[in-house]
Image (tube, rainbow, N blue to C red):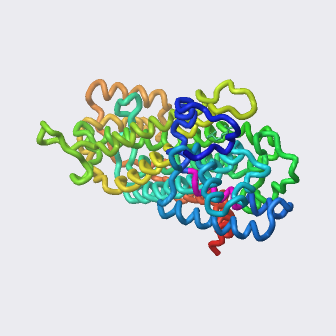
Amino acid sequence: MATKLWEKNFTPTAEIEHFTVGRDRELDAYLAESDVMGSMAHITMLESIGLLTADELKVLLAELRHIQAEIRAGEFCIEEGVEDVHSEVELLLTRRLGDIGKKIHSGRSRNDQVLVDLKLWTRRQLREVVELVKALFDELQAQSEHYKNVLMPGYTHLQVAMPSSFGLWFGAYAESLTDDMLFLQAAYKMVNRNPLGSAAGYGSSFPLNRQMTTDLLGFDSMDYNVVYAQMGRGKMERNVGFAIASVAGTIAKLAFDACLFNSQNFAFVKLPNECTTGSSIMPHKKNPDVFELTRAKCNKLQALPQQVMLIMNNLPSGYFRDLQIIKEVFLPAFAELKDCLQMTAYIINKMQVNEHILDDPRYDLMFSVEEVNRLASNGMPFRDAYKKVGLDIEAERFRPVKEIHHTHEGSIGNLCTAEIAALMKHILEGFGFERVEVAERKLAFEE
Ligand code: ARG
């Protein structure tokens, strides 16, 4: 059995070991590449302050690079008896290089190591989420423009209300994603600060150069105060969780609309056969399972910030092992969200839109406000026009005019697609992914 990083003259019992390690060997695998990257920056800095020789640094960096390649090739695992990813990487270095492997931990703790791993990993994940949100946004905007002249009923209280359009419907979800993108950006900016050097949460007597690791890892700046850096564990996940929940909320609502509109009773849209699933008993069924699963997954994702909060609620400042459990809810959330985003973008332009919904007289009354407005435009006071149309409806005298002229910003006739695209573009420019990419490549000698 491998020894612990902290082993001195006693070991915990197998039961204690099993319980405290928990799911770390599985979950820390998510963080392996980030852990190696953090170590590359840390030891480069250690050499600069004389805690490693140039030769030692060279050998260690080469081996870390080798481990990185093994991770990418799927040849890395956290061995039985090894507590976590931090221990595994150090163990590999020591096994392969001897005593210099044991030097890399000067001036750090697993507490700031896991902090920096989580930040590096989350930074990458958020970038991927942002790219998928943008791809979905583009699809929705394209659909919105494509169907801008196709009217559909709008509802309030799920009662037929006023004319809407497919242009508005698709476009609404595109614009919703611009607001979600703001949350993603705020989260990204909080994530992109360097906690490394905070060690166990109280800094170190070594003259660490934290600016150097900040620059090497491409962070915007650092979490300066070492106590705050440690307090960021859980807070970061919660805030990123809010951003994830915001995107998930948009997708869940879209999925519910799609399920409803795809029902025979609405029949506003129809999924092509190959995008539906069947029933084992009812031969006619073509079910919209994709949207149902998306809705459930996205509703579940909206619990993420609450889950994080409940785990860390009422913890005082300083590290606690409680924080380890956050990884169980936080790390897998990204794959789930990315899946939903990809699937939604995949299916959204395959939905067939019913261009003749309004031929059905059951929707006639939604043109009542158009008629009231027409009378009001011709000089009748609004309240009188409202009453007249109301009485006409009651007397079954109302005949709808189904041509509508909506011109103001954001209305059926003026979707502002370009303005919304400009808003999204402006937000996207604020992330600064390129700078991070350059730093990461340089650190891993990939350029
Ligand atoms: N597995 C631990 C976690 O995720 C790593 C940090 C361990 N630190 C400690 N003081 N026991 O939090």
Q: Can I make out residue 306 in this image?
A: no
User: Picture coordinates of residue 247 (x, y %)?
Assistant: 51, 44
Q: Quarter for ligand 1?
A: top right
The foreground one among 371 and 233 is 233
| Relative vertical location of residue 422 with respect to residue 240 in this rendering, above or below | below
- Note whether 236 is above or below 47 in the view shown: above
* Lateral position of residue 53 relative to residue 14, left or right: right
Of the pair 197 and 308, the residue shown nearer to us: 197
Q: Is residue 4 left or right of residue 371?
A: right
Q: State the residue at coordinates (63%, 66%).
A: 63
Horizontal and vertical percent for residue 371?
A: 39, 38
Q: In this picture, which residue range is highlighted in magenta?
A: 31-40
Q: Magenta span has 124?
A: no
Q: Residue sitting at 34 percent across and 33 percent down?
A: 160
Q: Is residue 280 left or right of residue 100?
A: left
Q: Is residue 248 above or below residue 65?
A: above
Badge count: 0
Magenta stretch contains residue 38: yes
Q: Residue at x 53, y 53 (%)?
A: 129
| 368 vs 69, nearest the viewer | 69
Displayed quadrant of residue 442: bottom right
